[in-house]
Amino acid sequence: MPPPPQTPEGSASEVVVAGLAREVDSLRRRVDGLDPLTARVDRLDEMAARTADTLKTVIGRKTKPPAPSWLLAPTDPGEVAGLVDELTAWLGVVFLRYPDGASVLPECWLWHPDVVEELLWLMHAWLAAYQGPDASVAAAGDWHDRQRPGVTARIRKSAGSCSIEAHQTRPGWSAPGGAPVPVPGLEHATAITGWWAQHRDQAPPEPARAVASPIGGALG
């Protein structure tokens, strides 16, 4: 059989280069066609990141509930009484252990919504610093160094000079005396919780004249 015709070396190279050029052009067109898809993938990534951040925020709020507010307390007397019970227990165990706390809290503190609000959040700040999932020495230090002194100073300024007789309007009533009580004014908690739960927009009840302190000392 006769040998195949010889192809000039230059012609063969040109054929190879031309073929490669066609392949490159075809690949380029395919890649260019992927640009819209790439943009959509980038947008999906951004949406996923924003969704993850949102879920993290929501989950964080569920696992770290905010402190209850006395100013926005529910209207159910039982729930309000529960707030007062928890708060007074904490006052006796923690807040009143500090001399400045014991000296600044007047017997009429339950008649001062701003004071109750301050004490409620301070209690929950203490719980978060000592017993919460993020409890730490740093959080406890901040409670001692900044939060507790700040609340104590504000209570002293707003109600430190007040007294139970300042809320009494009946003539002839005298100031209660006797030995100091661990948590002052507890005998008025029932009247205050009922008023604050259902009639907080009206005038507070007049304090009932107590005949004995919670620790046995005579009053009045």
Image (cartoon, rainbow, N blue to C red):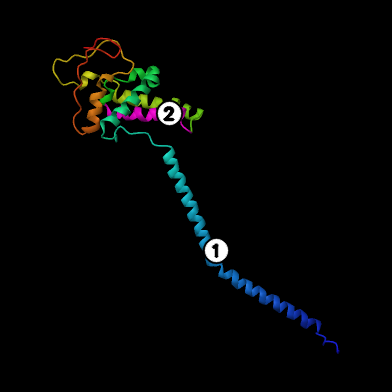
Q: Closer to the camera, 45 or 79?
A: 79
Which residue is label 1 attached to? 38
- Residue 17 placement (x, y as % from top left): 72, 77
Q: Quick check: 1 left or right of 178?
A: right
Q: Quadrant of the N terminus?
A: bottom right
Quick check: is 2 in the magenta stretch? no
Q: Closer to the camera, 46 or 62?
A: 62
Q: Is 35 placed above or below 56 here?
A: below
> Residue 80 sits in which quadrant?
top left
- Residue 13 placement (x, y as % from top left): 77, 79
Q: Which residues are magenta?
A: 112-133
Looking at the picture, which amino acid does disc 2 mark?
A: Leu
Give the SS element for disc 1.
helix
Q: Is 46 placed above or below 188 here?
A: below
Spatial separation of the CA atoms under disc 1 and disc 2: 49 Å
Looking at the picture, which amino acid does disc 1 mark?
A: Thr
Which residue is label 2 attached to? 127
> Residue 165 sits in which quadrant?
top left
Q: Closer to the camera, 50 or 156?
A: 50
Q: Quick check: 131 left or right of 30?
A: left
Q: Quadrant of the C terminus?
A: top left
Q: Residue at horizontal 28%, vertical 30%? A: 78
Q: Quick check: 117 left or right of 174?
A: right
- Residue 46 placement (x, y as % from top left): 50, 55
